[in-house]
Image (cartoon, rainbow, N blue to C red):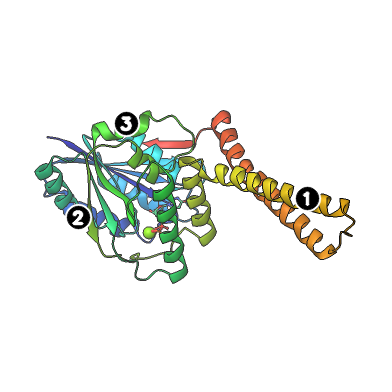
Amino acid sequence: MSLLSVVVPCYNEEETVNLFYDALIRVVKPMDLEYEVIFVNDGSKDTTLSKLMELYKSDEGHVKIIDFSRNFGKEGALLAGLRAAKGDYVTVMDADLQDPPEYLPKMFEVMEANGDDVVGTRRVTRKGEPKIRSWFARQFYRLINRYTEVEIVDGARDFRLMKRQVVDSILSLEEYGRFSKGLFVWVGYQCEYLEYENIERVAGETKWSFWKLFRYALDGIIEYTDMPLSIASWLGGCLTLVMGFILLVMLVRSLFGAAITGNAVVIALVLFMGGAILLSSGIIGEYLAKTYDEVRKRPHYIVKKFYE
Ligand code: UDP
Ligand code: MG
């Protein structure tokens, strides 16, 4: 029988882990599969770990827990889970039931029927989400799809069913920046998306603040395209040309006796230039920071204990 690994990152999910586990088991038990559920406790500050330990003890053999030494973020948790997963099929799910386990059998069906290597899911609506957040999300997908080599489907969730080979490919990528949404697509393979309407969290609240999401989107863009760097040099080049021309005109005019006037214009130009330079060095700084991360090669997470 084939083995299905379910990877679940958890950060302060005391209210949801039991609900999630029950819902998952109800779906997975009747399927013709062996299964393992790998919970990654991402430094929760509530009772998530003890809730997970209860599951671990009551369902010996199916539940595994990777306990981090602190909160390292969802990307690190995903990576740890994928590394530990031994399944012929691997799926990634949120603990809050926003990724409905009921879709699993359907995902297997589609995979079987069409010979896909990956079956992903995407939300076609974002109801229950703040409007401004949805707007920024749309802009993010527009940007990343236009300017990078990876095409990330709008609303694609991390919830996906992957064959062993796909997971091995993802793990073989050695870069430090683990922007999973990008890595999942970058490795290629035949992939299909099931669509569904947004489902709100069963309990607890989102762990992603607006700024955390904004930073996450920025990371995604910087890791997959050099386009912002070329904006900087393009802007710099244009400015130099235009300014050079203006200076030349002023010089010629002053040679013919015209007084150079208009302090306001000069101040505006100086500020404009200053802004452009700051923008450019800021963009370069972002890439430099990424390079620093890559070179430093710190681990993405530290495992305090692995309950196998
Ligand atoms: N998560 C995590 N570490 C973090 C933040 C979130 O492991 O630092 C987990 C969280 O427990 C959940 C999943 O990632 O299982 C998605 O988080 P959440 O539901 O808060 O995000 P949203 O669905 O609101 O985007
Ligand atoms: Mg959620």
Q: Which element is circle 3 on?
A: helix
Residue beneath label 3, please?
169
Along the viewing direction, whichever of 243 and 188 lies nearer the viewer: 243
Could you tell me residue 102's position as x and y percent? 19, 57
Along the viewing direction, whichever of 73 and 140 lies nearer the viewer: 140
> What is the CA distance from the residue labelled 3 to the residue labelled 2?
24 Å
Could you tell me residue 146's position as x and y percent? 41, 50
Name the mark nearer the viewer: 2 or 1.
1
Name the mark nearer the viewer: 3 or 2.
3
Amino acid found under the numbered disc labelled 1 = Leu
Who's the residue at 57% across and 29% down the image? Answer: 295
Could you tell me residue 8's position as x and y percent? 34, 47
- In the depicted structure, whether residue 193 falls above or below residue 115: below
Who's the residue at 41% across and 53% down the image? Answer: 48
Amino acid found under the numbered disc labelled 2 = Tyr
Please give left or right for residue 81 compared with residue 110 in the image. Answer: right
Reading the chain from its start, which is encountered first: label 1 or label 3? 3
Who's the residue at 61% across and 37% down the image? Answer: 288
Residue beneath label 1, please?
247
Tell me the quadrant of ligand 1. Answer: bottom left
- In the depicted structure, whether residue 154 falls above or below residue 117: below
Reading the chain from its start, which is encountered first: label 3 or label 2? 2
Amino acid found under the numbered disc labelled 3 = Ser
- In the depicted structure, whether residue 170 falls above or below residue 265: above
Q: Quadrant of residue 306?
A: top left
Could you tell me residue 284's position as x and y percent? 62, 41
Q: Which element is circle 1 on?
A: helix
Residue beneath label 2, please?
103
Reading the chain from its start, which is encountered first: label 2 or label 1? 2
